[in-house]
Image: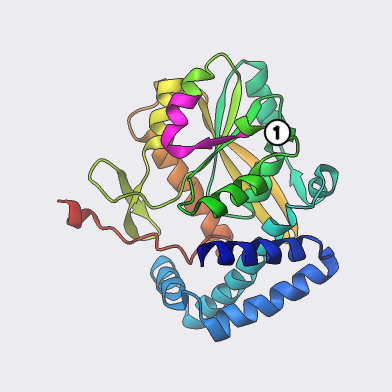
Amino acid sequence: MKKIGFWFVKALAYLIAITPFGLLYLRSDIYSFLLYHVIRYRRKVVRDNLVKSFPEKSIKEIKKIEKRFYRNLCDLFMETCKMLRLKPEEMSRHVTFTNPELIQSLYEKGRSVFTSIPHSGNWEWYGKLMHTVSDHKASGIYKKVKDPYFDAFMKQLRLNFNQDQEEMIEASTALKALVRRKEMVNAILIVADQSPRGIASDYWTDFLHRDTCWFYGLEKMAKLLDYAVVFVDMRRVGRGQYTVSFDLICEDPKAMEEGAIMEQYVRHVERFIHDNPDNWLWSHRRWKHTRQQQA
């Protein structure tokens, strides 16, 4: 049954991939209506996350953000499927980099860098285009999908246009893989706002009015490998149109105090969400752990 489900999803993805952009978002609007009003996909999770994150907003304002989020979520699904057919020059017309010279300047100094992005904008499109930003060796860290068919399919989607297998690094082996590449000048994409196990050794801090745990991997690997850290601010400025700005968190991670890199990253994510409240992944059960549970 899993294999049948995989082939159904893959066939749907290819049908979406060949859909012209003019029709793509019409289909997305239909899916969004069904997802929100009929299927009611994670409506309780989304509502709870929004209400607790924006206590100053009225229910009317929350519902407006909520509906925009579901439209953005469906757009994201459509755009991800389009990656099967989009050529590099076509995809580049949809994403504008405002200050790529920041990343290139790090390369010219011989500095490898972690480009850290939250689940915002279209992080999958950024991953496909990050090799165009600078002369770094660009790769992305990903979490393996349990189902082997879907895992292979997601790797197919995410691999760059030259199908370089080194562009994908599985999260559990990331540190070892990057140690082996210490002679290269790397730019490594890491989506760093997932919910970790919720243990005491995670990084805990206030985030959107709640005590929140974060993976410490970004900071720990940056210090061990001596990588600069840059925040990727990817904003949806129109349907299928994005701008990407880079903000340097640190160039010398070893000079940073314990927890300072993570704290700055969290504040960047929080500011982004306040500026773009419908552009974050609210359907994620981000606050399923509490620090009290680990005491």
The residue that mark 1 highlights is: 131
Query: What's the magenta region?
Result: 167-177
Say what secondary structure mark 1 lies in.
helix
Residue farthest toward the left in the current orientation of the protein: 295
Q: Main secondary structure of the magenta part?
A: helix
The answer to whether 242 is drawn above or below residue 256 in the figure is below
Residue type indicated by callout 1:
His
Magenta segment includes 173: yes
The answer, for residue 239, to whether it is visible in the render is: no
The answer to whether 12 is drawn above or below residue 230 in the figure is below
Residue 77: quarter of image = bottom right
Q: Residue at x 69, y 67 (%)?
A: 12
Place of residue 222 in the rendered image (x, y in percent of width and height, measured from the top left):
45, 27
Magenta segment includes 134: no
The answer to whether 234 is drawn above or below residue 141 in the figure is below
The answer to whether 295 is drawn above or below residue 42 in the figure is above
Q: Residue at x 50, y 46 (%)?
A: 268
On the rendered structure, is 229 left or right of 101? left
